[in-house]
Every structure is written in C-alpha cells, then in structure tokens.
Amino acid sequence: MSISQMEQVKTIRNKITRFMMMYKFALSELETKVDILKEEFHLLHDYNPIEHTKSRIKTPVSIMNKLHRKGCGTSFSSIRENIKDIAGLRITCSFISDIYWISEMLSNQSDLNIVEIKDYIMNPKPNGYRSLHLLMQVPVFMSDRQENVFVEVQIRTIAMDFWASLEHKIFYKYDQSVPARLLQELKEAADSSNELDLRMERLHREIEAIKGEQHHDDAEELARFMIDNKHFSIPAALMELLSEDIKLGKSGV
C-alpha cells in the first residue's frame, strides 16, 4: 500500500471514528440524565422506578447492512437521515406506570428533543410485543461544533423485557421461520405477561397507599433525609421558616 493510500485509509478511519463517537457521547449524556433521575427518586421518594438500563451502538457492518436493505446511499448524511437507531438505550422498570413516568421526565428535559413516540403498550404489535419507544435527539458538543444525535429509547417492564428477549431468541434459532404453533404460544405468553403487569401495578398502588397512611403522622421521620449515605435532620427553625415561605409561594426549589 502506497503512502497516499495509507493516508486515505487513515482519513476515512478518523471520519468513521468521529462519527461513531458522537453516538457514544449521546448515549453517555442520556445515561447520565437517567442516573440523576434514579438518584433523585431514591432520595426524594424512597423509590427507584428504574430497575436497570442497557445501551448499545450498531456496528459499522450492521449500519451498512441496514442501508443496503433500505436501498439508501452510503454517505454520512444518508446514514443520519435513514438510520435513527444507531444508538439505543433500554430502560427496564418494575411497573407500567413507571414507564410513562420516566417518559414524562425525559420529555421535560429542555435539551432533549422528542421526535417520535411509538406506544406499543397501548397498541401492542400483532405478535404481542409491548414497549414504549421514544426517538429523541441528544445534543453533543464536539470540539468544533454541536451535533443533535438521534437515540432510540425503549422503556418496558421486567415482564415485557423477558418476553421480548425470549421472542428474539426463538426467532434467531428458527432463522425467522417460526412454526405457527410457537407464534400462537408466544402471543398467549405476551397476554399472560400483560395480565401479570396489570396485577402487579394494582398491588403496587395498594402498598403505596398503605405506606402513605403509616407515615402520615410521623413528623420526626419526615424531617430526616439522606445524601451520599449521610443522614441529615432539618432544624425546627429552618422547617418553620420554609413552611412560611411555602405558604407565601416563595419556594424556589
């Protein structure tokens, strides 16, 4: 390989690396936001609506294969325009209500632009698949410019995630040609999974109501909080001062 050819390969490599880095940085930005939400809910509500998260970035080979399937050009602009799921983040929750709670919180982030919402919970796919999909643009600040990078976010319950994982493994094993009998059983399993989600949602609400009644009169306990595993108590004088501010509508937090 000549020197000029080597330089050309190096230039192409750097362009591809820079392109892929933008999606990595966008995922990092989004994961940081999710981590902040998790900690906020843990500290303020003694409850974490997010069980776990998983991120992924499509490989260059996967990107090229999808471009060919869609019959699109192979330029960077074509990739940006036609492939919106290069970066993906999956958020798994315990309850259905958590899904919409998290979606609302992300929608309220002023620097995130929600481009599209696909609600496969209210409108499941024919095979039984359920999940909430958000297509959003995340701002990434590079050394010489700002890029708004697409990230696909899937939010689902543990039961939905288990079913989707099982369905994917079955389709992979049968190379997309799944027998009709198994397809029917998968659909029935999805319905059973949804029934479990609805039952757990009801139990969750009843337990939260009971907890609220138990702690309603425990003023001393309510005046305690914890940050970075350190316990703090709100002084009575500060509590009285802030109570007056809240009554006058002066609370700024």
Image (spheres, helix red, strand yellow):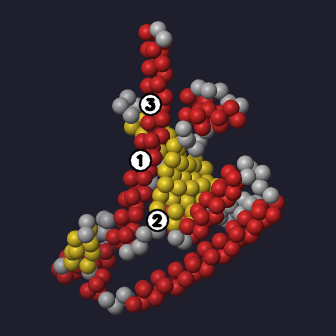
The disc labelled 1 sits on which kind of residue?
Ser
Residue drawn at x 39%, y 37% is 141
**Left or right position of 96 against 177:** left
Residue drawn at x 51%, y 66% is 93
How packed is label 1: few (under 14 Cα within 10 Å), some, or many (20 or more)? some
How packed is label 2: few (under 14 Cα within 10 Å), some, or many (20 or more)? many
* Disc nearer the start of the sequence (3/1): 3
Q: Residue 106: horizontal and vertical position, in percent?
A: 48, 57
Q: Nearer the viewer, residue 14 or 245?
A: 14
Q: Residue 172: horizontal and vertical position, in percent?
A: 68, 51
Residue corresponding to mark 2? 50
Measured in 3D between alpha carbons, the distance from the residue under mark 3 to the one under mark 2, in whole angstroms, is: 31 Å
Which image quadrant for residue 251?
A: bottom left
- Does residue 51 sit above or below 70 in this rendering? below
The disc labelled 3 sits on which kind of residue?
Arg
Whether pointer 3 and pointer 2 mark residues with C-beta atoms closer than 8 Å, the reply is no
Q: Is residue 25 visible?
A: yes
Q: Residue 61: horizontal and vertical position, in percent?
A: 58, 34
Residue corresponding to mark 3? 18
Measured in 3D between alpha carbons, the distance from the residue under mark 3 to the one under mark 1, in whole angstroms, is: 15 Å
Q: Is residue 113 visible?
A: no
Residue corresponding to mark 1? 28
